Image: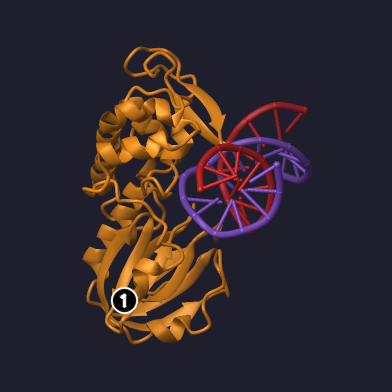
Chain colours: A orange, B red, C purple
DNA sequence: AGACGTACCTGACCGC
DNA sequence: TGCGGTCAGGTACGTC
């Protein structure tokens, strides 16, 4: 389920629910997710207190009081839930027992997710993090930065927007949505879009912000509830709306494939 | 160096 | 009802 807004929603939910809790036990139900768990994974986490839960790109960062940070990525299908102890469900892979007797469970059918333990002081140079571009809400992600970055690319704008080196957090849904908002054809080459960098920065931020706010209301209790109902209650302008009328001009929304992914856009509004 | 395709994995859905 | 094919919110990696 996760692009930046969904990860942010999960982080906020978890932060409000389990910050300050100590992890008393860790159960790994298998030896790997996308990658094998480090051999001392459970040992590094057990007994530690969760000091703070934050987000970098689409990664969740659980800062522990032992100088380590639990790094987690939800992949395509990962989810965290907090509950009283319960029978394990299919695809529950990691169970953290907390000092208030609740459990934090990581479930992930496709297992594209990632978990790793990192020295907090070395987080920035972690192999999965060091190459990441600016956060979309940071000052570093601005019109002049984006303009220059787009000028040095050759491909179509939509796949470029999903490149986490350019800006983090934008995935397949919000790349299409941001381009609709900016009225830019997703097939247009990145350099040709460079003059509209300011508008694109604004559009990306708006799309993500609206989704966070919508996710915040529709998914408020996400970490307490099984399943992820509510996510699709967020209304998209173009994503997954092939053949349906554009909300602005009634033209049917088109679907094309770019870099192996579905792209949705309005052929009249976007050029 | 950058762009693109492929791989990873399960489950939902569609047409037959 | 079952079967095969296709698709899904991500990202690392190989290849050109």
Q: How many marks?
A: 1
Horizontal and vertical percent position of residue A215: 29, 46
| Quadrant housing the C terminus of chain A | top left
Q: Specify the quadrant of the image occupied by residue A49.
A: bottom left
Depicted A230 relative to depicted A109: above or below: above
Q: Is residue A99 left or right of residue A240?
A: left
| CA neighbours of label 1 inside 10 A, class few (<14), some (14 to 19), many (20+) | few
Horizontal and vertical percent position of residue A93: 51, 69
Depicted A54 relative to depicted A159: above or below: below
Q: Is residue A221 left or right of residue A117?
A: left
Chain letter of the residue beneath label 1 in the structure image: A
Q: For mark 1, give the secondary structure.
A: helix
Q: Depth check: A139 or A44 in front?
A: A139
Depicted A135 relative to depicted A185: above or below: below
Q: Depth check: A138 or A8 in front?
A: A138
Residue A34 in view (yes/no):
yes
Q: Residue at x 38, y 72 (%)?
A: A70
Q: Specify the quadrant of the image occupied by residue A145.
A: top left
Q: What residue is disc 1 on?
A: A121
Residue A241 in view (yes/no):
no
Q: Specify the quadrant of the image occupied by residue A185.
A: top left
Horizontal and vertical percent position of residue A247: 33, 19
Depicted A211 relative to depicted A267: above or below: below
Q: Residue at x 42, y 43 (%)?
A: A171
Horizontal and vertical percent position of residue B9: 63, 58
Q: Depth check: A84 or C10 in front?
A: C10
Q: Residue at x 21, y 48 (%)?
A: A139
């Amino acid at each position: 389920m996760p692009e930046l807004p969904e990860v942010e929603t999960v982080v906020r939910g978890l932060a409000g629910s389990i910050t300050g809790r100590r992890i008393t036990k860790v159960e790994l139900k298998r030896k790997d997710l996308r990658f094998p768990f480090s051999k001392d994974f459970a040992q590094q986490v057990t007994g530690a207190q969760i000091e703070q839960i934050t987000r970098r790109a689409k990664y969740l960062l659980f800062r522990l009081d032992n100088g380590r940070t639990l790094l987690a990525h939800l992949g395509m299908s990962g989810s965290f839930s907090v509950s009283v102890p319960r029978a394990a469900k299919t695809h529950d892979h990691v169970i953290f027992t907390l000092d208030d007797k609740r459990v934090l469970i990581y479930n992930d059918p496709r297992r594209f997710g990632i978990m790793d333990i990192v020295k907090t002081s070395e987080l920035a140079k972690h192999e999965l993090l060091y190459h990441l571009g600016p956060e979309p809400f940071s000052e570093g992600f601005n019109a002049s930065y984006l303009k220059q970055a787009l000028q040095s690319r050759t491909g179509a704008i939509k796949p470029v927007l999903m490149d986490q080196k350019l800006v983090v957090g934008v995935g397949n849904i919000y790349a299409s949505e941001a381009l609709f908002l900016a009225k830019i054809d997703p097939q247009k080459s990145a350099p040709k879009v460079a003059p509209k960098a300011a508008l694109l920065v604004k559009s990306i931020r708006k799309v993500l912000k609206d989704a966070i706010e919508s996710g915040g209301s529709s998914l408020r209790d996400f970490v307490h509830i099984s399943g992820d109902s509510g996510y699709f209650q967020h209304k998209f302008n173009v994503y997954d709306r092939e053949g349906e009328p554009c909300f602005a001009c009634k033209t049917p929304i088109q679907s094309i494939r770019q870099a192996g992914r579905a792209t949705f856009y309005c052929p009249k509004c976007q050029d």
